């Protein structure tokens, strides 16, 4: 059963375009990972500082593996996250 992660990021003022670029760099390598079922970044059309990322993985282990990848460490944790004013993650499992 899929393991779902709902992520909401709010970029610091003036950092929103750099966050969008980092998410674009993450898209292709993330979707190529084993265990990644869905990874779709979204941007709020009314507030371009707010991003929502809908992620589904084969299981919690696949999510954990994703967070250890070179591209996540470089583009997510290393580039995008320091540009955030706020970061929220929610984890869901089907019942």
Image (cartoon, grey):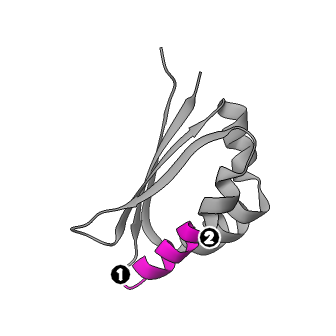
Q: Is residue 93 above or below residue 56?
A: above
Which quadrant: the N terminus?
A: top right
Left or right of 87, for residue 58: right
Q: Which residue is drawn at the image coordinates 76% and 53% (left, top)? A: 68
Task: Name the one closer to the observer, 27 or 9.
Answer: 27
- Label 1 secondary element: loop
- Give the image location of residue 32, x and y in percent: 71, 51
Left or right of 71, for residue 76: left
Q: Which residue is drawn at the image coordinates 71% and 42% (left, top)? A: 64
Measure how far apart labels 1 and 2 are at the Cα level: 21 Å
- Give the image location of residue 31, x and y in percent: 65, 51
| Chain part drawn in magenta | 13-24
- Give the image location of residue 78, x and y in percent: 66, 71
Left or right of 56, for residue 65: right
CB-based contact (under 8 Å), mark 1 and mark 2: no
Q: Which residue is drawn at the image coordinates 47% and 73% (left, top)? A: 20
Left or right of 40, for residue 33: right
Q: Nearer the viewer, mark 1 or mark 2?
A: 2
**Label 1 belongs to which residue?**
13
């Amino acid at each position: 059963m899929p393991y779902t992660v709902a992520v909401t990021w709010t970029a610091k003022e003036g950092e929103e375009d750099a966050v969008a670029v980092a998410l674009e760099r993450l898209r292709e390598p993330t979707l190529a990972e084993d265990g990644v079922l869905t990874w779709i970044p979204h941007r709020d059309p009314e507030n371009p500082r707010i991003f929502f990322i809908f992620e589904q993985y084969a299981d919690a282990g696949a999510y954990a593996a994703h967070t250890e990848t070179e591209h996540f460490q470089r583009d997510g944790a290393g580039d995008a996250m320091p540009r955030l004013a706020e970061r929220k993650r929610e984890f869901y499992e089907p019942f």
